[in-house]
Image (spheres, rainbow, N blue to C red):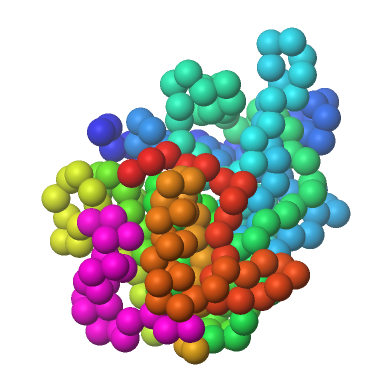
């Protein structure tokens, strides 16, 4: 694993001079390569776009035939941000990410301004603790939700469980969490409420193991000095590969939690549109 933190920014002058010509075009304002497999980028936000933290949109590029090549991407920035942030894996032979990973500030991407998704607080019943359960780039919607004041107004505690193969792959989430308590906008409301539990599955780390194993064994509850999940107090959101989502769903149901939706709030929700890399 190559650990990189190359960041590329765009000057205001270049941002102003960029003229969208793709359909639903937005301009890339910055790109950061975290590892040889992971990168994040920020783009201009359509003036009319309104979304709830945790939702996703379709973004992409034009393919060789001049047709839009689009994929669902969770918005990693909070709803109050003036720009939109995305966090992506690089797939060498992926139709979209093999090209998307080469974008630079000033380039354009296609962004369909119709946000949807199930990872929103409105899809959960009121509770005491909110668990964010993610693998790999599945942390993206939680990067949005962890920066949303509404989350901390509705829950006494927020626990971010994130599993990756290697330590470098956790860096995006680590830097985000580390900066939250000193954030001038939401630092005060986050203070003492957010618990971060990163783990690895391959490289040695102070916490190791899959999210599923640490939940099922009770290790995470012991490490954080928290009670086991119960449907009266605990709520959860899940985002990762299809296999991960199914495994976590079974564990949550074993604790007595029920899956909800925007139209039928319950104790947990799963993002079905996102398919991240396996762990």
Per the rendered image, the range of residues in magenta is 209-231
Quadrant where the N terminus sits is: top left
**The furthest residue to the right:** 48
Which residue is drawn at the image coordinates 73% and 33% (left, top)?
Answer: 110
**Residue 196, position as x, y percentages in the image:** 35, 69
Does the magenta-highlighted stretch encompass residue 32? no
* Quarter location, residue 168: top left
Which of the pair 120/144 is nearer the observer?
A: 120
Which residue is drawn at the image coordinates 79% and 59% (left, top)?
Answer: 50
- Residue 28 versus residue 179 in the image, above or below: above
- Is residue 36 left or right of 142 when viewed as pictured? left
Quadrant where the C terminus sits is: top left
- Residue 87 versus residue 235 in the image, above or below: above
Q: Is residue 113 visible?
A: yes
- Is residue 253 left or right of 11 when viewed as pictured? left
**Residue 258, position as x, y percentages in the image:** 54, 73
Which of the pair 49/20 is nearer the observer?
A: 49
- Residue 69 versus residue 58 in the image, above or below: above
**The furthest residue to the top:** 65
Q: Is residue 160 visible?
A: no
* Quarter location, residue 121: bottom right
Which residue is drawn at the image coordinates 69% and 17% (left, top)?
Answer: 63
**Residue 269, position as x, y percentages in the image:** 57, 65
Does the magenta-highlighted stretch encompass residue 220? yes
* Quarter location, residue 42: top right
């Amino acid at each position: 694993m190559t650990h990189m933190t190359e960041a590329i920014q765009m000057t205001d002058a270049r941002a102003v001079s960029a003229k969208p010509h793709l359909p639903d075009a937005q301009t890339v304002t910055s790109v950061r390569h975290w590892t040889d497999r992971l990168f994040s980028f920020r783009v201009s936000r359509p003036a009319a776009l309104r979304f709830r933290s945790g939702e996703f949109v379709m973004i992409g590029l034009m393919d060789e035939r001049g047709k839009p090549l689009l994929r669902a991407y969770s918005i990693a920035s909070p709803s109050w941000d003036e720009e939109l942030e995305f966090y992506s894996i690089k797939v060498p032979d992926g139709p979209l990410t093999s090209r998307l990973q080469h974008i630079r500030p000033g380039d354009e991407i296609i962004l369909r301004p119709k946000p949807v998704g199930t990872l929103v607080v409105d899809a959960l019943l009121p509770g005491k603790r909110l668990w964010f359960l993610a693998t790999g780039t599945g942390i993206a919607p939680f990067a949005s939700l962890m920066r949303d004041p509404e989350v901390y107004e509705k829950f006494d505690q927020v626990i971010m469980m994130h599993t990756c193969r290697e330590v470098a792959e956790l860096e995006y989430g680590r830097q985000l969490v580390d900066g939250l308590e000193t954030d001038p906008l939401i630092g005060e409301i986050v203070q003492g409420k957010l618990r971060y539990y990163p783990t690895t599955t391959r490289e040695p780390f102070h916490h190791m193991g899959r999210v599923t194993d640490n939940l099922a064994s009770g290790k995470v509850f012991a490490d954080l000095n928290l009670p086991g999940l119960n449907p009266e107090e605990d709520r959860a959101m899940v985002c990762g590969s299809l296999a991960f989502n199914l495994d976590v769903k079974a564990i949550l149901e074993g604790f007595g939690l029920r899956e909800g939706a925007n139209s039928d709030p319950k104790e947990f929700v799963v993002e079905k549109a996102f398919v991240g890399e396996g762990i």
